Each structure stands twice: as structure tokens, then as C-alpha cells.
Image (cartoon, rainbow, N blue to C red):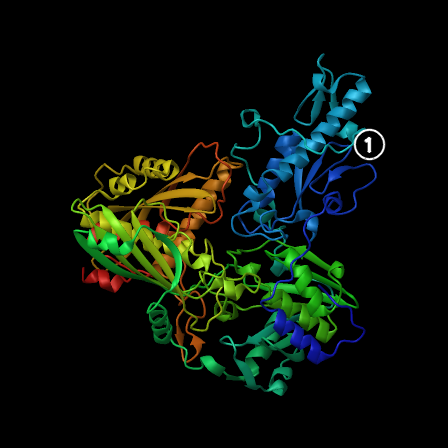
Amino acid sequence: MGITVESPSRRGLLKTGAALTLSFALPLATTRAALAQAASAPASNTFAPNAWLRITPDGKVTVVCGSAEMGQGVLTAIPMMVAEELDADWALVSVEQAPASAAYNNPMFGMQATGGSTTVRAHWTPVRQAGAAARQMLVAAAAQQWGVDAASLRTERGQVIGPNGRQLSYGSLVEAAAKQAVPEKPVLKDRKDFRIMGKPTRRLDSAAKINGTAKFGIDAHVEGMLVAVMARAPITGAKPKAFDEGKAKAIKGVRKVIAIPSGVAVLADGYWAAKQGRDALGIEWDLGAHADLSTDKVSATLDEALQNPSAIARETGNVKDGSANSARSLTAQYDVPYLAHACMEPLNCLAWVRGDEVTIWAGTQSQGPAQGILSQVAQVTPAKVKVNTLLLGGGFGRRFAPDFTIDATLLSKLSGSPVKLVYTREDDMAAGYYRPTSRVRFEAGLDDKGQPLMLRAEVASPSIMAASGFMKIPDNGVDAMAVEGLADHPYEIPHQRVAYGRAEPGPQVWFWRSVGHSQNAFFIESFIDELAHAAKADPLKYRLALLEKHPRARGVLLLAAEKAGWSRPLPKGRHRGIAVAESFGTWVAEVAEVSVGKDGAIKVHRVTAAVDCGQTVNPQTIARQIEGAVVYGLSAALYGRITFKDGKVEQSNFHDYPVLRLNEMPKVDVHIVQSSEAPGGIGEPGTPPIAPAVANAIFAATGKRLRQLPFDGEALKRA
């Protein structure tokens, strides 16, 4: 994974940096030895039976979390899961961010990384087992001390309790417990006995975020560091033709100008000097093969891919027979644009390469891959790469990419100094790694009662799998992420065919919150609504009739409709739309209450969401994640768009890439289904249903079907 070299050449380092920009070197699978190691070597008087927790003689419990915290609540969820099985006193529980280590590999990924709404569902068993094992060892230690059968003892709030009521605190047992054998298969609690999990719980990181002591990536600082701002390639494949290093160095505080594969960096004593130096470079770009990239060309590329989308993602029945037997047919085309992640905290990374050691401080979603990647960038062994994961001011998939950590490490290696690389907002917006543009063409055949007999969907989109650098498109040619939520939609239709055509206009694409579900739920839920209206049927009842085999989908639809008052009249000028989607193991239905002004302005007044995410950890977090997902999805539906002209991105900041403002925020009501199903994800599933729910409400309000995102208010003026 890494090669130690005495004196690497600058050319070699640059080649390595370029090659690794989209190539993940994955760490080895978790081993028992790794799991036995805690985040840092515990003190001799500390009970640390595994990597996940430590108990000190004062009874305090520290839980170590290997997932990155980007607002989704993992720094509380993981401790709740451990503490539940440990039977800890929650008031004595704190949390610590883990280092990069195979001990904290995400079981669903096989590497230490945070994404795909996997933290709770991936760690549901292992971290609970960590707490249960510690509890069993503490009980064994107490039984030994009292000379009684361990089966006669119970635990409660950090105490081992004997049959006669006498107690021993966990803190008093740490030394004796550490001598007990770690159980191979500790028994987990029955959910009816949960005291902590499933209860609304205040987040452990809230106080630090409120009082300003929380440390985000942008807060990282070491003495003697230089701050770097880069002139980045404006499009994939572009290279600098010329730049004025002298003008940059004339700026007070500028120390170095370094060209690397992704652009030209200016290193200075502080951010402002680095930015001024970068702006003074006067760089000229060779835009290469994408010099003529435009939004019109992107559209033409999608059309070309739809000429013969031969990769079959789903085929049931026979669409030709279904079409022939249909009483009528409907066709429609839907489109979504490229989207930026627009994290509130722009990308940044502080890297320090010292000899054969690399240390970074960053808000990253991929600590494990970073060790392998950066070891190759700096030409050291992976064990010599230390990753300090700081809080993320938004991730949404963007901070899973390695570009900002690679460039910071490369600049530190070449400059001989610690380097803090900071993207400006404009850099962030134009840096690529976008949610792919996508286009779908639907054809449906209905019987004489308006029920669908046939559905054909042809999708064109760039491939995230190919762009990722660590995933491979299977032999059938289908990028699963381009069709997820569409190829596996739940509606029972006898004859179906979903085909994919890969389109690669040029911009770099990446994972975006809820990935393919973000656009495909808009596509299928809007089109199902079209079929309902063509059948002159209530959109809710129409869906329910097609979901007989999907009780969880029906459950959230009925709950959302009930809580939204679906059958009750609304004030004049307001209308409702409904949508349902499954993603990441969770079902979410949303009802949007919308009005449309005479000027075409769309106002979303209320969103009612019903969530079935299986067994829950913290209902408070679930509600907040759905609220945040609604904000994120509404921002995209109302405003989000990355466009191109003459090979460059046209958007630069929030003035031309708006996000939802406070005065635009609807009231969001979240209702959680009590479920015994396996836990699903929650960070992303609230996003997919919001755009179609609003689109369907707009149709109810105006009779105008909007099939493109963001919604076109001008079109509504003419409705």
C-alpha cells in the first residue's frame, strides 16, 4: 500500500498525487488484535476490554466513535448503543473521536469510512456486543469478589447489584474486571429492556458546538504552518498554460508558489495573503477536451445516451405485450441538473509531512482510505499516517473524496512545512465532484380502469461507480447508483423494463446526499402521480393499490396522510402532494402543503413526514435528520443547478447557487413508526421524497406538471 523511498523526486511525487486523486487504497479488514486496541493506550487503572470503551475508577465511561460526525449524530448514537448494553449511567458517559484504525472499520464497507447512512445499521451488533462484553466482565468480577453465582446479579446505571441489594460501582471493579476473559459471544438485551436506546436524548456534542469549543477542520492550527489557496483546474483535464509567479510572490506574506496536478497553489503566512496571491497569478488554462463544454452539450450527451440504453437494470414480464394490451399510454421525460454539495464549511485539510511520518487534521468521511492514499502520496508506510478526524461542517458525501487531503499532503511534502489547504467558496463550487445530471424517459400503458400494465424507463446519467476510483461497473453495464430507487421501485406493475445508458459529458461526479435516490424518487414518484391523475384517482389510494406486497411502504403513506389531514380541506390556495421512497433500509413518506403565487413563486408551508427506519436509537436525531434532509432536498428542488459555459462552471457562491433561507423554511412534522425491523439509515432517506411531494402539490395547485429540477417559476406564471 505504501513504499518508503529515501529521497523521492518532485516529479515522482506529482505523478503519485495525480494518480491517486480518484484511487482509494483500502485498509485491511478488521482483525481481533485490532479490535482489542483502544483509541489510545489506556492508563493502567483503566478497564478497556475492546476498542470501543474505557471505564476509569471514578466510574466514568468513555466511548470511542470511529465514524465521522457531520451533524448526523453518530457521536451520540454510538455511545447510546454501547451504554445501553453496558447498563451505564448515561450522566457519566462521554465520547471521543477514534483515530484511523482497522479496529473501527465500518462492517458494511470493510474500511473505516462514514457514508451511505450506515453507521447505526453497520455497528448495530458489534458496538452493542462491546458494551455487553464489558458488562459481563464487570458482573463476573463482582461475583468473584462476593463469592456468588454471576447469574444471581444484575446491573443498573453503572452498578452491579446483588440479590440482597448490596452494590458495587463499575469504577470500583475496573481492576478486577480487566483480569476477566473477554466473552466471545456476549448476550444482548431484549429491546423491551432498553433504558437508553429508543429514548429522545440530548446530543453529547451540542454543548461544545454552542459554546464554540468544538473543533472543526477549519479550526486546525499548528505553529509554523503555511496556509495554501489554489488556482484549481476549472474542468476535468484542464492544465495551466501560464501564470505569473512573481506577481503572487509580491503579495506580502506569500512564501511559495507550487504547481501540482490539480492546479497552482500559493502558500502564505495566512489565508488572506494566500488568496490574494492566488488571485494575482493571472493563470491561463488549457481547457483540453472540454473547452467547449456547455449545458447544451451536456443535454445533447444525455440524448445520445438515450438513443440505445442497452444496459438492462430491471426486466419483468414483457413490455411489448404490456403495451399491446394497454387501453392507453402515457409518455414523459424528466431531468435533473448537476448539483454541488454546498457544505457550509468549505473543504480544508491541515497536513504535516515530517520525515517518514504524515499527520493530517481534517473533517473527512474516509479516514481508513486516507491512510493508504496518503501513504502513497508521501511515500511512507500506512502505519506512519496519522489521521485526526475533526468535526465536519457538512459532508453529504463530498468529504468522502480524497482530493483535499491529497493536495494538502503533497504541498506539505514539497514545501517542507505544515500546510493548511483551504478552499474558497468559489473553489468549492467549481471543484467538481457533483451529483450527476440525469434524464429519464418514461412510457406507461394503462388498462381501461387506469391501472398500469406496463412501465418502461430509460435513464441516461454519468457513472458514479466509474468516477469513484474504487468501484467497478458490473458486466451488465449498469451503474447501480444511476438507477437505484427506480429499478427497484416497489410498485406492482406486470410488465417492466428499466434500461441505463451511460453519458459522460465531462464534469467529475460523486456521491451526493442519498445518491441516485435523490433524482430517481423525483422521477418515479412524479410519474406515478401522473398515472394516478390520468386514471382520475386519488394519488394516495392509487399508490396503496399498487403496494399490496409492501406493508412498510403502505404504513408510512397512511401515517403521513393521516397526520397531514390528507382527506381534510385546506385553506384556499393551498394544495397537497404526496410521495414515498425507500433508501438505505428506511421508508419515508412525505406530504407537502404548497401554494403558488400569481408570479409563479412556490411556497412550501408544511411537510409531514412518516419514517419507518426499523429499530431506533435516538428519536430526537431521527426527527432532526428528516428536517435537515427536507432543507437539503428543497434547496435542490427550488434552486439547485450547476451549469456550464465555455468549459467552465457558471455558479460561484450562494448568490447564484441559493440554498433555502430561514424565512422559506416550512414547518416539518416527523412521525416515527414503531418497528421491530432491523435498523435502517437516517442521514439520507428524508431527501428523496421531498422534491416529488412538492412537484405533485404544484400540479394539484396549478394543473402544470413540472418535470425538471429546479422548478421553473416562469412556467407556473403561464399555468
Image quadrant where one finds the N terminus: bottom right
As displayed, is residue 419 above or below residue 238?
A: above
Residue 385 visible, this angle: yes
The answer to whether 106 appears left or right of 139 in the picture is left
In the image, what residue type sits under mark 1? Lys
Report the front residue among 323 and 306.
323
As displayed, is residue 719 above or below residue 558?
A: below
Residue 226 visible, this angle: no
**Circle 1 residue:** 179
The answer to whether 130 appears left or right of 339 in the picture is right
Q: Position of residue 324 (x, y in %)?
A: 20, 54
- Residue at (79, 42) in percent of width and height: 42
Q: Position of residue 207 (x, y in %)?
A: 59, 44
Q: Label 1: few (<14), some or many (≥20) within 10 Å?
A: some
- Looking at the image, how many numbered discs can be counted on the residues? 1
Q: Position of residue 631 (x, y in %)?
A: 41, 52
Report the front residue among 442 and 631.
442
Q: What is the quadrant of residue 546 in the picture? A: top left
Q: Position of residue 639 (x, y in %)?
A: 36, 61
- Residue at (62, 72) in percent of width and height: 19
Report the front residue among 718 and 472.
472
Image quadrant where one finds the C terminus: bottom left
Identify the secondary structure beneath mark 1.
Answer: loop
View extreme (right): residue: 44
The answer to whether 716 appears left or right of 46 in the picture is left
View extreme (top): residue: 164
The answer to whether 451 appears left or right of 334 in the picture is left
- Residue at (54, 25) in percent of width and height: 192
- Residue at (71, 75) in percent of width and height: 414
